Image (cartoon, grey):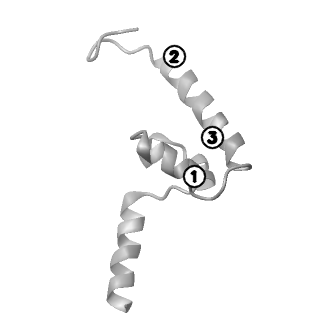
Amino acid sequence: MTAPGGPVDMERFLRRLARLEAGLTDCAYYAKPGVLAGIVEKAGLPYESLSEDVAYAIGIEPLFRSLAGLQRDRVRG
């Protein structure tokens, strides 16, 4: 393990990210809607860290899209 701010082993990082995404995709089939999104958001993993298909599968939307939706709803409502 490296110290914060030290060199990063990108191959190791990408392997771990791929394993995380595979696990999330597998769990998405069994989990109730929103459960995985809540776990990922609570852990502080932003939308931008996930591939689009995984984010979609677990119900996370990009911040700009959800903010646009909120503003649109305010104008209508």
Q: Residue at x 63, y 40 (%)?
A: 24
Which residue is labeled 2 in the image? 12
Amino acid type shown at disc 1: Val
Which residue is labeled 3 in the image? 24
Q: Residue at x 57, y 48 (%)?
A: 36
Amino acid type shown at disc 3: Leu
Q: Is residue 52 visible?
A: no
Q: Residue at x 48, y 21 (%)?
A: 13
Q: Nearer the viewer, mark 3 or mark 2?
A: 3
The answer to whether residue 52 is above or below residue 77 is: above
Q: Residue at x 60, y 52 (%)?
A: 58
Look at the image and tell me in which quarter the C terminus lies: bottom left
Mark 3 falls on what kind of element? helix
The answer to whether residue 20 is above or below residue 53 is: above
Residue 68 or 30: which is nearer the viewer?
Answer: 30
Q: Earlier in the sequence, mark 3 or mark 2?
A: 2
Name the quadrant containing residue 5.
Answer: top left
